[in-house]
Amino acid sequence: PRLQVVHLGDLLKRIETDFAPMAREKNLALRVVPSSLAVKSDPNLLRRLVQNLVSNAVKYTPEGKVLVGVRRKGGSASIQVLDSGIGIPASKFRIVFKEFARLDEGARTAPGLGLGLSIVDRISRVLNHPVDLQSSPGKGTTFKVRVPIDIEASRRKAKATIEKAPAGEPLQGLR
Ligand code: ATP
Ligand code: MG
């Protein structure tokens, strides 16, 4: 992989565009919170990773919401994909990352090959971006991906955002 500057705001905007039709069709609220953070990653691999998580969140959520956002955790950005879907029992947290693994409840809910999370796992290892899974059956699921922040690129982006903002308008996404 080629590590370079990746602007999370741009990446997440693309994800939102890609999945908005599917979410609308299911009557799900898909909310993607803007971010001005820049990280050190591989843009194509990171996008594929997040796409697979959002695809699952939308597929395995019969009703409610899917929320995608970024939190700053020290020197890292934590990309978070939350859903209010069917959930994954803790006893299955390891198995779902294996190739072709599907849970009965998941297979009943939506079609798939059981490959998305195995790709997430591979990319996570190759890029050294740890993935964390929290879930409770019937309530929902949260996946978090930890990615190193590019501080200089984030500052430049935040500064450009300030300079572009019309005077008097409240600034968003800079914290
Ligand atoms: P594919 O991604 O190849 O289209 P898939 O979605 O079944 O198929 P994975 O993305 O690898 O495969 O997910 C494996 C299984 O883990 C799913 O079949 C489902 O049972 C469960 N799962 C994954 N994400 C979620 C989620 N957000 N909520 C509930 N179950 C999930
Ligand atoms: Mg999937």
Image: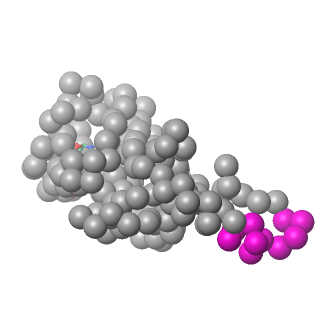
- What residue is drawn where x is 21% and y is 24%? 91
Relative to the observer, which residue lies in front, 99 or 155?
155
For the image, the number of numbered tags is 0
Q: Is residue 97 visible?
A: yes
Magenta-highlighted residues: 160-169
Residue 23 or residue 10, whichever sits in front: 10
Residue 171 pos. (x, y %)? 76, 60
Based on the picture, tell me whether residue 163 belongs to the magenta stretch. yes
Q: Quadrant of residue 104?
A: top left
Looking at this view, name the residue that lies furthest to the right.
168
Q: Position of residue 135 (x, y in %)?
A: 36, 31
Which residue extends farthest top? 91
In this view, the residue farthest toward the left is 100
Q: Where is residue 130 shown, x and y percent of the image?
A: 31, 42
Which residue is found at the position 27% from the left and 28% from the top? 89
Is 73 situated left or right of 96 in this image? right
Quadrant position of the N terminus in the picture = bottom left
Q: Quadrant of residue 71?
A: top right
User: Taking the image as drawn, is residue 67 in sight?
Assistant: no
Task: Indicate yes or no whether the magenta region holds residue 92.
Answer: no
Q: Residue at x 38, y 45 (%)?
A: 145
**Residue 46 in the image, given as x and y percentages of width and height:** 34, 60
**Measuring 12% from the left and 43% from the top, which residue is drawn there?**
98
